[in-house]
Amino acid sequence: MIERRTRATATGVTLLALAAATTTLQAQEDRSPTLLDRISITGDPDRIQDVPGSAQQLDRDELDRHSYSDPHRILRAIPGVNVAEEEGFGQFPHISMRGTPPERNSRITVMEDGVLVAPAPYAAPAAYYFPPMGRMDRVEVQKGSSAIRHGPYTTGGALNMLSTPIPDDTSGKADILFGSNNGRRIHTHVGGTEDLPGERSGQIGWLIEGFAEQSDGFKSLDNPASGPNQPDPNTGFDRRNIMTKLRWNADPTAEIYQEVELKYARDDRTVNDTYLGLIQEDFDSDPFRRYHGSQKDEINTENELFQLRHYINPTPNTDLTTTIYRTDTVRNWYKLHEVAPDGADFDDPDSFTGIGSILDDPDQFASEFDWIRGQQGEDSDARGAVRANNREYYAQGIDFRGGYWFDLGGWNHELEAGLRFHEDEEDRFQWQDQYEMGEFGDMYQVERGTPGETTNRLTEADAIATYLQNTMRRGPWQITTGLRYEDIEILRRDWNDPERTGANESRDDTATYRVWIPGIGATYEIDANWSVLAGVHRGFAPGGTSPDSEAERSTNYEAGFRFSSANTRAEVIGFYNDYSNINIECTAVGGGCADDDIGTVQSAGEVEIYGLEALAIHDLGASQGWNYAVPISLGYTLTQSRFKQDIGENAPNQWAKARKGDSLPEIPEHQINASVGVGQEDWRATLNANYVTSVVARADPDFSDQEIESRLLLDVSGEYRVHQNVRLFGSVENLTDKEYVAHYRPAGARPGKSREFWAGVKMDF
C-alpha cells in the first residue's frame, strides 16, 4: 500500500540508512511490488545492500537529528556528493556527484517522489528553485550503473526526495524552532486513513502539511538610511510551503489492488540576497559586510506542483504506475548587474561594466567600485543598472513505470520498464533599471527599463525517454542490466521586440539529441557479511540549443565492497569517469558571460575524474552491551580530476584558461564527514564534523589566489523527551563560529554562514 512502512527507532544505527540486515530468503521470495518502490529510486531500505552501485538513504530519524533545512548540510553526509556554497542558507544549492559541474545542480537528476522537479529540467537545468528539504521524509542518492533509470543526467547520479507519507492512523506533528538572527522554522502536518462505508469499498487517506522558515540573515548591509537609529535592512529570507495529499486505495484483500493519489504543493519565497560579494581586503576586515550597491537586491519565487498518480497490481507479479505531473515556476531576481562611471553615456550599453569584472580589478574600475561602496564624489553621476531577471517556467508530462517478476533459467528476474513523455519551457523576459547613489548611500531610480529589452527569449524542450532494466538473482549473485533511450529536441528563440511579433527574431536554434545509454552492474555475496560490486555505464547530458552542440558523454566505471554485521555497516567504492566530452554552461552566477551567451553550452573536451567513496557506521553502545546507543559514522570522499587539453580563454565562467593537467575548479580533493552520538529512548545528543580541503575557485591562473578555503565545521544538536509526545530540541550550527571564504562567485568573496543557535519543541499527536 502507498507509503506504508515502519520507522526506525531513534536508538538504532540510524545515522545513515546505507544498509540494513542481509535480505533473508523469505524477503527474496516475497517480491510483491508496492508504490513505494516506484517513487523511490533505491527501493526498500532492506534492499540497498544488494544494489550494484552506490546507493544511500537518509531517513526521517536521521533528518530529525539536526533538523537542517540547508540541502548542503544534509547531503554532505553522503560520500561522493560535492556541494558549493553561495548564500549560506542553501536556498540556491550547487550539488555535484562524482565531480560533475556543481552549477545549480545542472548535471544531476533531481526528483521529488520520483518525478523531475527542476523548473525546466531539459530546457534550463540550472535551477533557481529547489524543494524545501526541511519537509521531506527521506532523501535518497543513487550513483553508478543502476542510476540510468533516472535520466537525463546519468554521469553523476540521481537525488530523490520523498515527501511525508499519509499515515495509517489519524496523527500529526509540529516542530517549532527559533534561532539566531530572528530565525524561525516551523514544520507541521496532520493526516490519516479511514475505511470507507460499505464492504470492500477501500480506504481514503489524506494529509495536510505546512513548512515555513525565515531569517533576517547573517550579513550586514551598508545602511542606506539617512537618519539615526535606523534598523539594519534584512539580508535573510522568508519561505512558506504547503503540501497536501488525497488518496483512495482499494481494500487490501481486493483481487486487484490499486491506488490513486493526488498531490499538490505550493512554495512562495523571498530571498534578500545578491550576486555582489566583497573584494578580499574588505572581506578580511568584515566578511559579513554587504556593499551599498546591493541594497535593492532580492529574488521572489513562486512554485506550484501537481501530481496525479495511479498504481495497480493486477497480478501478484506485475504492477503499473502512471503519473501525470505539472510544475509552474515564476521568479524574478532583481539585483545589481553592472555599473557605468561618472560622465558615461548611459544610453550606451557598452558604457556599463559587470560587477564581476569590477570586483576582479577595482583599481581599473575605481569610479564604478566607489559607486558600489557608496563612496563616489558629491558631484558624481555614476549609475548602477539593476537587472530584473524575470523568468517563467513550466514542466509537464506523463510517466509510466511497470514491473514484472518471474523465474527463468534458474534465476529470479525483476523486470522494470519505463516510458516518459515530457515537455518544459523557460521564458526569459528581462529588463534593467538605472539608479544613482545619494549623498547618504541611498539608491534612487533615475530611469525605468522596458520589459524584455535586455533578454527576450523562449527555450522549449520536448523529450521522450524510455528504459528497460532487468535484475537477476541467483544464489550469491545479483546482476542488473539496463538500457535507456533519450530523444530530446530543444528549441531557442530570441526576439528584439517585446511584442514577439517574429519580425525581429534574432535567433532560432534547434538541437536534437538521440542517444542510447546502457549500463550493467553486479554484486556477489561472499558470505553473510561481505559482498563485492562492480559496474559500468554510459554517462550523458544534453548539450546546448545550437545545432552544432555536442552532448556530454562519458564511460563510467565503479567497483567496491560492502560489509554488514549486527552493529556495523561499511562500504568502499572506487569510481572512474572517463569523459570523451564534458560541457560547461555559461551562466550569470558563474560570472564573465555576455548577456547573449547566458544559457549557451560549450564543449570542453576530454576530462577524467576518479576517486574513492567510503562510509562506515558502527553502534559502539550495542557492540559493547551498554544500555545506551553510541552511533558513529565516518564518511570520506576522494575526488581527483584533470583536463586532457587546454580549454582556452573563451571558455565561460570558472573554466576559462584551464590548462592541460589542471584539476577541475570547485571540486575539493578530500572530504570527511564524521558523526558521533549518544542516546537512550528519552534523550540523545549528536556532534557532526565536516572537513573539506581547499580548492581553487577558477582555473584562470591570473586568479589563483581565489581559493575556496579548507574548513572544519562542527554542528551539535540534542533533544530531551519531557512527555510521551513532546521533545525539547536544541542545536548549534558552526559551533566554533568559523569564518571562511565559501566562494568567489558570482562576483567577489562570499562568506559561509556564521554560528547559529536553534531551540524549540517537537510534538507528535
Image (tube, rainbow, N blue to C red):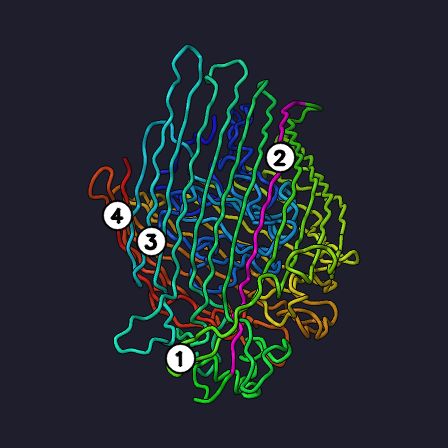
Marks 2, 3: nearer the viewer: 2
Residue 574, image x, y percentages: 61, 54
Q: Quadrant of residue 627?
A: top left
Q: Earlier in the sequence, mark 1 or mark 2?
A: 2
For the residues labelled 4 and 3, the Cα–Cα distance comes to: 17 Å
Query: For numbered disc 1, what is the local secondary structure?
Result: loop
Measured Cα–Cα span from mark 1 to mark 2? 54 Å
- What numbered label is drawn on residue 686? 3
Observer able to see residue 23: yes
- What segment is highlighted magenta in the picture? 382-407
Dot in front, 4 or 2? 2
Residue 552 visible at all: no
Secondary structure mainly formed by the magenta segment = strand
Q: Amino acid at mark 4?
A: Val
Q: Nearer the viewer, mark 3 or mark 1?
A: 1
Asked if residue 391 is among those painted magenta in the image, a careful observer would answer yes
Mark drawn on residue 441: 1
- Few, some or many C-alpha atoms within 10 Å of disc 2 (few <14, some 14-19, many ≥20)? many
Q: Could you tell me the amino acid type at mark 1?
A: Gly
Badge 4 marks a residue whose secondary structure is strand
| Image height of 228 relative to 570, above or below | below
Q: Residue at x 55, y 66 (%)?
A: 668
Asked where in the image residue 314 lies, by quadrant, the reply is: top right
**Residue 440, above or below 185:** below
Quickly name the residue at label 2. 399
Packing grade of label 4 (10 A; few <14, some 14-19, many >=20) is some
Residue type, label 3: Thr
Report which residue position mark 4 lands on.
761
